[in-house]
Structures are given as C-alpha cells and as structure tokens.
Image (cartoon, rainbow, N blue to C red):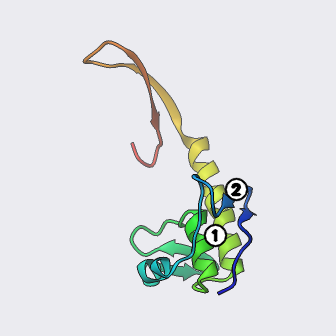
C-alpha cells in the first residue's frame, strides 16, 4: 500500500492523519468494511446504498488501500465540492415562529427535499 503524507490537501480541503478532525487512517478494517460498498461511475466513486460520493477522508483511505486510484480520488472530491456548493446555493432560509414557544426561528429548505 502506498502511504500519503500525514497531511494532505484535496479539492481545497485539508486532511490530517493524526488530528481530531478530518482524520484518515487506512487500516485493514477500512478495506474489509468498504470493499463491496461502493462503485465507480466513470471516474467518480459512489456508495451503493445512496449513490452519494463518500467524504474525502474515506476516499483517501480507499486510495491508500488500492481500491481506487488517484484520479478517482481527485475527480470524486472535486465533484462532491461542486455538488455541495450547488446544494447550498439552492437552499432558502425560511423564518417562522415556533408554535410551542413563540420563538423566532429559521429553517433551511431545499426545493428537492421540501
């Protein structure tokens, strides 16, 4: 298995092997747990369960384990960022009063999920 450096940046996000947030580890457990849980559509990695792109730390694990290649990693991370940006650009903020407390509140509403 090829090892990445302890810190790496992919698609503008930083991942570190030994920090509390955004860690990636690549263990045999990752290989065993995810080896049959994803598919590659073109160069994009997607979960079998929901057709979503895995988070970057999981993609790093899969790459280090040799289950996907660096092109799959980069293309998947880039597309995930684009899809995330698109999602948030379409979200509306809706103000309302909580019926139970009368408190002013805000909820996020996306047209695909309302």
Q: Position of residue 110 (x, y in %)?
A: 47, 42
Q: Quadrant of the C terminus?
A: top left
Work out whether 7 lies above or below 105. below
At 71% from the left and 78% from the top, the residue drawn is 71
Which of the two residues, 54 or 8, is positioned nearer the viewer here?
8
Tags 1 and 2 touching, CB below 8 Å: no
Work out whether 90 lies above or below 80. above
Q: Position of residue 49 (x, y in %)?
A: 39, 71
Q: Quadrant of the N terminus?
A: bottom right
At 71% from the left and 74% from the top, the residue drawn is 4
**Secondary structure state at the residue bearing disc 1:** helix
Q: Residues within 10 Å of mark 2 (few under 14, many from 20)?
A: few
Q: Position of residue 65 (x, y in %)?
A: 59, 83
Which of the two residues, 74 or 1, is positioned nearer the viewer here?
1
At 61% from the left and 64% from the top, the residue drawn is 56
Residue at which label 2 appears: 13
At 42% from the left and 78% from the top, the residue drawn is 33
> From where the camera sits, is residue 45 visible?
yes
**Secondary structure state at the residue bearing disc 2:** strand
Outermost residue toward the left?
Answer: 100
Give the left or right position of residue 96, taking residue 76 as reference. Answer: left
Residue at which label 1 appears: 76
């Amino acid at each position: 298995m090829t090892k990445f450096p302890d810190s790496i940046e992919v698609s503008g996000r930083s991942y570190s092997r030994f920090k509390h947030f955004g860690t990636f580890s690549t263990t045999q457990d990752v290989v065993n747990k995810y080896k049959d849980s994803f598919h590659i559509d073109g160069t994009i990695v997607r979960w079998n369960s929901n057709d979503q792109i895995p988070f970057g730390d999981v993609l790093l694990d899969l790459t280090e384990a040799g289950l996907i290649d660096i092109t799959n990693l980069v293309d998947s991370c880039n597309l995930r960022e684009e899809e995330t940006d698109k999602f948030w650009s379409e979200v509306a903020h809706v103000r309302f009063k909580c019926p139970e407390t009368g408190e002013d509140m805000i909820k996020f509403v996306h047209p695909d999920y309302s």
